Amino acid sequence: MSRSARAIPLDCLGPHARQQVDNVLYGAAVQKALRAEKKANKYGAKRTEVDGIVFDSAAEARRWSVLKLEERAGLITGLERQVPYAITINGEHIAKWIADFRYVRDGQTVCEDVKGVRTPVYRLKAKLVQAIHGIRITEISA
């Protein structure tokens, strides 16, 4: 049985029916707002903005500020952030690791990762990046 939908003015409804409509509309609005909220980081990191750049954590933002000062002072050159490294074995892409920062100090390339928690996945990726790319990751404690 098919019916065409018709709009019914809310003022035609009794108080109980109006309350039900309000509950449905309010519930939908609350659900939409909850979906819009960003999921909190499970390790407690808070996104932080510095120099118009949004960092995954306040510790990473602080490190960026220090490295920018070192770059201005001429202690480091070629400062980059979020540099990806492919983890490929026997021609098959397994994963990627993203360095928080990469720069050159005293002629040596340095790859840094700001770490609050050294997860098992991170430890494995760090070993693979070292084995494949010959890169030793410098860990900066949060």
Image (cartoon, rainbow, N blue to C red):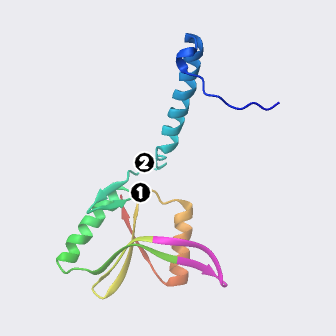
Q: Is residue 129 above or below residue 35?
A: below
Mark 1, residues whose alpha carbon is within 10 Å: few (<14), some, or many (≥20)? Answer: some
Q: Which residues are magenta?
A: 86-98
Where does the image place residue 9, in percent across and percent down from the top left?
55, 21
Q: Which mark is residue 116?
A: 1
- How far from the left and from the top, in percent, is residue 52? 28, 62
Disc 2 marks which residue? Answer: 44
Q: Quadrant of residue 95?
A: bottom right
Q: Is residue 46 above or below residue 87?
A: above
Which type of secondary structure does the marked residue at label 1 adopt? loop
The label number, if any, that marks residue 27 in the structure image: none
Q: Is residue 129 left or right of residue 138?
A: right
Whether the residues at callouts 2 and 1 have beta carbons within 8 Å, the answer is yes
User: Is residue 25 positioned above or below 85 on the image?
Assistant: above
Q: Residue at x 46, y 50 (%)?
A: 43
Quadrant (top left, top right, bottom left, bottom right) of the N terminus: top right
Q: Gap between marks 2 and 1, in whole Å?
A: 9 Å
Three-letter code for the amino acid on which mark 2 is drawn: Gly
Q: Position of residue 53 (x, y in %)?
A: 32, 63
At 66% across and 84% down in the image, what residue appears?
91
Secondary structure beneath label 2: loop
Q: Quadrant of residue 104?
A: bottom left
Residue drawn 54% across and 78% down? 86
Percent across and percent down for residue 30 are 50, 33
Asked if the stretch drawn in magenta spans residue 32, the answer is: no
